[in-house]
Image (tube, rainbow, N blue to C red):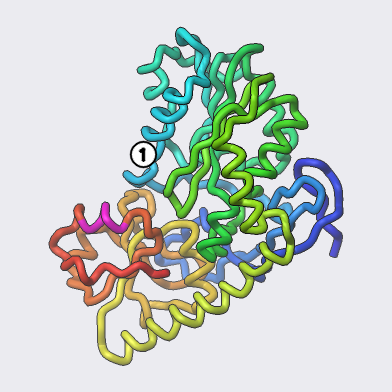
Amino acid sequence: MLNPTCRFCGKDDGRIVLDLGHQPSSELFPEVGDAGADPVYPLRMWLCARCGLAQLADDTVVPEEVLGREPAALTEQRRAAIAAVAAAGVLPPGGGTAMEFPSPHGGTWLDGLAGHGFAAVPLGRRADVVVDACFGVMHEADQQAALRTRVDAVAPDGTLVLMFHSLAAIMDGGQWNALRLGHYAYYSTPGMVGMLAELGMTVTSAHRFPLYGGTVVLTASRGGAQPPALDELLTAERATGVTDADAVGALGEAVGRTVTALRARLEEHRAAGRRVYGYAAASRAVSLLCLVGADRTLLAGVADASPAKLGRRMPGTDVPVIAPEELVAAEPDVVLVFVSDVLDEVRRALPQIPADRWVDAG
């Protein structure tokens, strides 16, 4: 087995900090009638000792299928981020142009930036504000090239905006199932600040939001001073141990705890004759359900608001993906929600299901 090399700095000094074995793609949902074994691939996280970038250790290329629908929580977080960045005074004064690098997760900042005087321009030009939309850059295998492309698109006095799910939040919440094929990089704020500095960019504002347990938005430009809010964020994340392989490696301990607890809970419900369903056929549910060994006897179905996922099944299982109205008609005793950020949203959307039947899958 070859030792990985860093997707940003190219060094091979690092360590595997999380190994989930072989897992199916969390983007390729087979047809529900396809009973064949799904292809599986190694799923491991490697932490670079030089630049601190946590990343996929293996170069498996899995096509992205844009099947999901953006949750309201992500839409609201983006609005809050645009407001915070504008209030920080780090956008070029007087408006100008804005460019956005797209993401398979969907969503756009361009409409919000238009309200602050920035007109959209297409990729391939330079812009006063360049946004990496909705965790887009993490889908790039070559992190050095991807970040450089975004930096090069920023006009001389312009601003780059990056949003990422913080590695510190993943560690704090034991969110080991954030690791998935196609997500090549997992950023800490110290790591991202260092990578941007190597590309000639200085972080000019830092904002943390509660989405997914901790989402960070950084702005950067060529020049400027590091703000106090960034110092506080750097201190907090370093205390979490985001650059320490032993600390990040503790995620592996969370795998066994989560899988064992969920399997026991599902078996208890089955023994009691309760009808158990899930909600959110999200990428983070795929490896969780595979490791649990979920099947229709434990989990009757997983509801999702994305029409494109209907008629399909959860990868690596025989559990079907169903429409929200089918979930209501099934009158479930328990609904396990696999993305905690949508819990309030789905309770409001499906009031026919008593509120106490919705449970965070943990």
- Answer left or right for 229 relative to 43: left
Residue found 19% across the figure and 54% down from its top: 348
Q: Amino acid at mark 1?
A: Thr
In front here: 151 or 221?
221
Q: Position of residue 278 (x, y in %)?
A: 34, 68
* Pointer 1 local density, CA inside 10 Å: few below 14, some 14–19, many at least 20: some
In front here: 327 or 173?
173
Residue found 40% across the figure and 59% down from its top: 339
Q: Quadrant of the N terminus?
A: bottom right
The answer to whether any part of residue 124 appears in the image is yes
Describe the element under mark 1 as helix, strand or loop.
Answer: helix
Where are the magenta residues, as a range? 343-347
Taking the magenta stretch, the answer to whether it contains residue 345 is yes
Up-down: is 34 above or below 187?
below
Circle 1 residue: 75
Residue found 44% across the figure and 65% down from its top: 314
- Answer left or right for 101 relative to 252: left
Residue found 25% across the figure and 83% down from its top: 274
Q: Position of residue 96 (x, y in %)?
A: 49, 9
Which of the 4 image quadrants contains residue 196?
top right
The answer to whether any part of residue 162 appears in the image is no
